[in-house]
Image (cartoon, coloured by chain):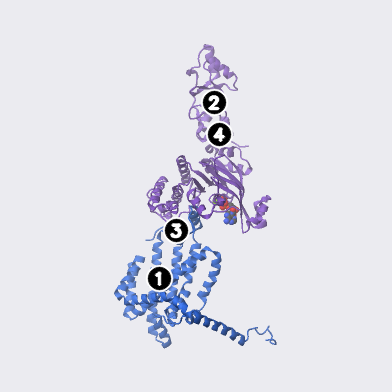
Chain colours: A blue, B purple
Amino acid sequence: MADSNWLTEFPQLDRGELRDIRKALDSGYREFSREYGELIESFFDPLLTFLVWFEKLLLATPWSIVIIAVAGLAYWASRSWKLGLGVVISFLLIGYFGMWDNTMRTMSIILVCTFLAIALGVPIGIAMARSDRTQAIVTPALDIMQTMPAFVYLIPVVMLLGIGKIPGVIAVIIYAIPPVIRLTNLGIRLVDKDVLEAATAYGANPLQRLLGIQLPLAMPTIMAGINQTIMMALSMVVIASMIGVKGLGQPVLKSITNQYFTLGLFNGLAIVALAITFDRVSQAYAKRAQRHMGGLNND
Amino acid sequence: MTDALIKIENLYQLFGPTPKKYMGLVHEGKSKDEILAETGHTLGLKDINLSINKGEIFVIMGLSGSGKSTLIRHFNRLIDPTEGVIKVEGTDVMKLPPKELEQFRRHKMSMVFQRFGLLPHKSVLDNVAYGLQIQGVKKAEALDSAKKWLETVGLAGYEEQYPSQLSGGQQQRVGLARALCTDAEILLMDEAFSALDPLIRSEMQDQLIELQKTLHKTIIFITHDLDEALRLGDRIAILKDGEIVQQGEPEEILLNPATEYVEAFVRDVNRARALTVETVMKDPAYRITAETIKEALEQMRGFKQDYGYVINNDGYQGIVKEDTLQEAYDDDSKADLTNELIEQVDALEQDAVLESVIPTTLEAEFALPVVDTDGNMTGRLSRGTLSDVLGVRH
Ligand SMILES: Nc1ncnc2c1ncn2[C@@H]1O[C@H](COP(=O)(O)OP(=O)(O)OP(=O)(O)O)[C@@H](O)[C@H]1O
Ligand SMILES: [Mg+2]
């Protein structure tokens, strides 16, 4: 390095040093996972039990009851019989083309991921909205989570926890949680200052302001975030299947390696049908819950 | 002055990242513009001293940007002052810990906002009950009371509507009902009626005056409209660039503006509507209290005019002219002053606004007597006085 000209040649680390760094980091992490892997795994045990139980429940429930339940939920949330009917038809088609079990598996993991993402994301979003410092720390972390290729953070997760449902859930959540956090933060920050001031003037304490004013008024924005989170979770299904999450992702993966176009297309369409169902139901519900805020009601 | 409910002493507000650092400049007497240019800090309020009595309507007035909203937000500490003392019933509001400050806001003060500040996601009834709900009052009780106040402000039947479904005037009534519902003794009103059209606005003013007759709240009312200030205020403080340039009773400000700024404010006011007869009348001179014509004539000789106001134990009776008396005296020098000699001229009531007495005063050939509600003469009002007050100003 001493005799080369640093103006023409980039002054880079030489291979030996680079390899040493890599080795040190890799072996360090490997040691860490050997040391603490079991502990962390046992920490996630209750979640795993629940995931398995929920998947079994969906699989064991007769298809007719699942369809009635999902269509009923869609109708209750949207009060639109068109949406209910659409859900019934798409689920019937899914079953007819032999994808019922995989769809139930995917649905179970997506529902659990969404629930966890909301349970983690909304409080984080609230914390961000309450302090500029927290926002300054969390925002770059979210940027990384959204842009870092999923495969990169799959590696340490798999090293730590092996292959299976839990690493899949973690990967899906890392990928899908940013929108709900960002939009919770944004929604709360955008709440009308006048309304908040009025609440303060009447002696509302911080908790009363949060639950009575900020969260309800931010709800349309938060719902948009939840909706995005569900969509992103579904789009992770294929990648998650690479680390052993069963469901609609696995046939897609198989059809890539074996060039089965039709198999891939069918399972892809099933994912799309699930996505549209979740999307429409959550949006319709959000809209219905916020009707009065638009002023002139549109029912 | 001893029973001041609210006292504000040497209050300063300097807006900016490091206000404490530059308070020296403020005390040196640098102007708002100089401080802004030198330090980038905005002087919001400067050396405010106020003392507000129980049960009065205290109006704070000033042009846009003069610091009215900033000032009123100090009363319940929505803004903390840079320096100064705020005392309510002797308690230093600045020293209250957060929990007690919440209690103070819940029970002592309520506020009506310029832009309403209603909760868009709650029904009108829930909005009115909001203060009580925050206090933790039982739901049914809170809603009952809210219903009552909604009725008082004339919005019965709108309980289940949402704020966005009401007109501006109706929304402000909801705001007023919400403020009254907590039964706090101090009412803060920041340009509460400014966003309303003139008709609704004077309706709301009437309603406030009417309510105040029974409620006897202490009201701090902000406005940029002098007519409104004069109509509502027991006392008025005028704010300019964060400083109080004059405070006093409405007539005082109208008749003796302290600075050119106040004078400019006062110039366009409709004095005929703002002043009552009492505030401009002359003293109750030229009274005839005699029982006989002879004595009456003697009293009148001392006058600078040829008529007088006949007063007896029942108060003002009418006007008598010197030549009528002289004629009667020539007929019978020992006669009593009888009713036939007295001209029945109606007196003016001292509480009447000038506008209502302009025609009678201008048409009368005499300066008209002014009486109080018991019929006692308390002053007189002549054509000359009236045109002086209403006409060209010095
Ligand atoms: N948070 C703040 N930061 C900096 N400057 C402020 C802040 N709030 C108010 N000011 C300044 O204080 C001054 C007074 O503002 P304020 O809102 O009290 O005026 P106002 O008399 O209520 O006017 P208006 O009639 O328009 O409501 C203005 O110069 C404004 O720029
Ligand atoms: Mg203002």
Mark 2 vs mark 1, CA separation in Å: 86 Å
Question: CB of mark 1 within 8 Å of CB of mark 4?
Answer: no
Residue type at mark 4 is: Thr
- Tag 3, which secondary structure? helix
Other-residue count near label 3 (Cα within 10 Å), few / some / many at <14 / 14–19 / ≥20: some
Rendered view: B356 above or below B327: below
- Asked whether mark 2 lies closer than 8 Å to ligand 1, one says no
Identify residue type, mark 1: Asp
Return the residue at label 3. Answer: A212
> Within the image, what quadrant is residue B384 found in?
top right
Neighbour class for label 2 at 10 Å: few (<14), some, many (≥20)? some
Would you name the residue on which mark 4 appears?
A: B279
Work out which quarter of the rendered image holds the C terminus of chain A and state it: bottom left
Same-subunit check for callouts 1 and 4:
no
Percent x, y for residue B203?
46, 44
Res A155 visible: no
Residue under pointer 2: B366
Which quarter of the picture shows residue B60? top right
In depth, the one of A61 and B238 nearer the eye is A61
Mark 1 to mark 4 CA distance (whole Å): 72 Å
> Sequence order check: which comes first, mark 2 or mark 4?
4
Query: Looking at the image, is mark 1 or mark 3 earlier in the sequence?
Result: 3
- Mark 1 or 3: in front is 3
Q: Are marks 1 and 3 on the same chain?
A: yes
Residue wearing tag 1: A279
